Amino acid sequence: MFDLKQNGNENITETNAKAAVEASLEKGNNDESSKIPEVRYSTYYNGKKVNVYRVVVQPPNDWKTLPFNKLPDWLQDNEFLVKGYRPQLPSVSLCLRSIFRIHTETGNIWTHLLGFIGLLIFAIYCFSVPLSQKTWQEQAVFGAFFAGAITCLLFSSFFHTIYCYSFRVMKSSAKLDYLGIATLVVGSNVSLIYYAFYCYTIPLIIYETVAIVLGTAAAIVSLFDKFSESKYRTFRAALFGGVGGSGVVPLLHYCGITGFYRAIEIGGIPWFLASGLSYLVGVTLYATRTPERFFPGRCDIVFQSHQLFHVFVVVGAILTYCSLNSYADYHQLVGHNCSVVHSIFKNGFVTQLRRS
Ligand SMILES: [Zn+2]
């Protein structure tokens, strides 16, 4: 429900009042008592006496959470979360204020909102102190990673906050959410590939191109309306998991060049594997709706699969940063000199270099 004062429309004619009430009905206002226009005063228009109305349609600030089976079809997504859902909220302001209420989306919103704030502050710190010493290429690579991760977390928390406004808003904001995941995947893969193949131009170009093309393809597919439907949950998980997992091929190639133990010694690979594992666990929980499928109604507010998925995404992004940082340290150590890098890969002087 809404107050027409919000639209700068405090005084309106009878015709407009009816239109406003009809609009409020379309928006899902079911409180019958609040739909009656109130005569504010009478006046004369073109020689005729007309009533001027003020519509007293107020937002339901006191909205109550609903069980799954009372939701409109388009808000039903996960039947294992039994109750605690936000109803359709008819104003953006109410959706925004709902982040301070307890419901099934509270955890989803805050896990990525706090991740977004934390990562944004950390990115500002990195670019103001440690990264300011690095080459412009390295700054661009870290920039791609931070931009991807920050966009993902921001779009995700926006989607979870706003989607209960209307079916159309849900569809549009879900596309933003998926677009954010694509930017995270591309930003992470592109930056890691840069460091792994820094001294190997042809593989560098090939893998960077493939990472960008796959990420763009995933983003385009996610723009189809059907993509956000509940029944395509596994397909979504497989698509983003597959595009993210495509980083395994350059990883194996990299280990082939350096040798597995040297790759571990350089330091980026263990962090990369840990971040991949974190994403994999998160996506698996999301796709299988674990643990709520085993405890229906017990995970409505906390520990539901989507929240855990969000936490694993934030952890995965942090571990990706650690991997990048390890590579950056290593390149600092060898002085960005490719003949030294090739010699290390051939002779294994990493430990000696670190000790010296
Ligand atoms: Zn989400």
Image (cartoon, rainbow, N blue to C red):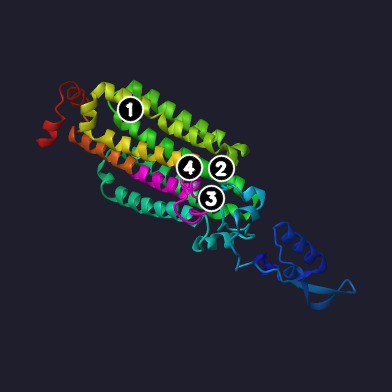
Mark nearest the camera among 1 and 4 is: 4
Nearest the eye: 161 or 155: 161
Q: Residue at x 70, y 58 (%)?
A: 28
Q: Which residue is mark 2?
A: 175
State which tag comes first along the sequence, 1 or 4.
1
Q: Position of residue 197 (x, y in %)?
A: 30, 27
State which tag comes first along the sequence, 1 or 2.
2
Few, some or many residues within 10 Å of mark 1 (<14, 14–19, 20+): some
Q: What's the magenta region?
A: 290-318
Q: Which residue is mark 3?
A: 159
SS state under label 3: helix
Residue type at mark 3 is Phe
SS state under label 2: helix
Few, some or many residues within 10 Å of mark 2 (<14, 14–19, 20+): many
State which tag comes first along the sequence, 2 or 3.
3
Q: Which residue is mark 1?
A: 251
Tags 1 and 4 touching, CB below 8 Å: no
* Residue 115 within the magenta-colored segment of the rendering: no
Q: Residue at x 40, y 37 (%)?
A: 280
Residue at the bottom extreme, as displayed: 41
Query: Splitting the image into 4 quarters, where does residue 346 fall?
Result: top left
Tags 3 and 4 touching, CB below 8 Å: no
Query: Splitting the image into 4 quarters, where does residue 60 fall?
Result: bottom right
Q: Residue at x 71, y 66 (%)?
A: 31
Nearest the eye: 129 or 94: 94
